[in-house]
Image (spheres, rainbow, N blue to C red):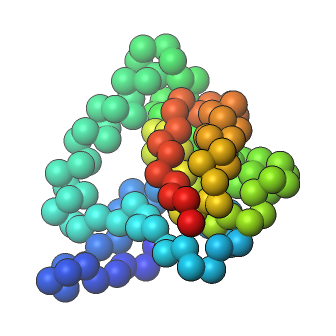
Amino acid sequence: MSLPICALGDEVRTNYFNDPFLRVTQGISECPVPEGPMLTEAQARAEAHGRIERGTSCYQSGQCRLPNSYLYDKEIIPRVKRAIEADGRFAETSIWVEGQRRFVWLKGCVRTTGQASELEKLVRSLDDVQGVMNQLIVK
């Protein structure tokens, strides 16, 4: 589990579900670090039941080989990192990737909208990735 941080009002937030969140590139120094999957204890309790239902419905519907779609994330996110690094076109970006339920969030900064589109296309093409949430900003 990641180290807890304090939110506004000193409410402790942490990565309760151990969702993977990795920095991939760091080519834009003025890019702010995006928030990872940090929740308060109350938010985690409220989210727990829905995560169980969403996680197992993938297997029950025959769309997942693993019994819970969240089990894919610890494998997918390192593969996303390797794919972006191996591609070679994105060294001048500052990218973080987060995974939940076979979905990948792209966060951070790119130089052009074209880079954002190409990153999304690259990640979407990887095995087991169900969807990509492109939250990249142009700097």
Residue closer to the observer: 119 or 67: 119
Residue 35 in view: yes
Measuring from the top left, give residue 76's x and y in whole percent: 63, 44
Q: How far from the left and from the top, in percent, is residue 33?
A: 49, 73
In the image, 78 versus 55, the foreground residue is 78
Q: Position of residue 118 (x, y in %)?
A: 68, 41
Task: Write the residue at 43% across / 79% down.
Answer: 3
What residue is drawn where x is 47% and y is 51%? Answer: 135
Q: Is residue 135 above or below residue 56?
A: below
Could you tell whether 40 is left or right of 29 in the image?
left
Q: Image quarter for residue 92?
A: bottom right
Residue 20 at least partly seen: no
Q: How many labels were placed on the picture?
A: 0
Side of 86 relative to 56 (left or right) = right
Residue visible at 23% across and 41% down in the picture: 49
Query: Extreme top residue here?
Result: 62
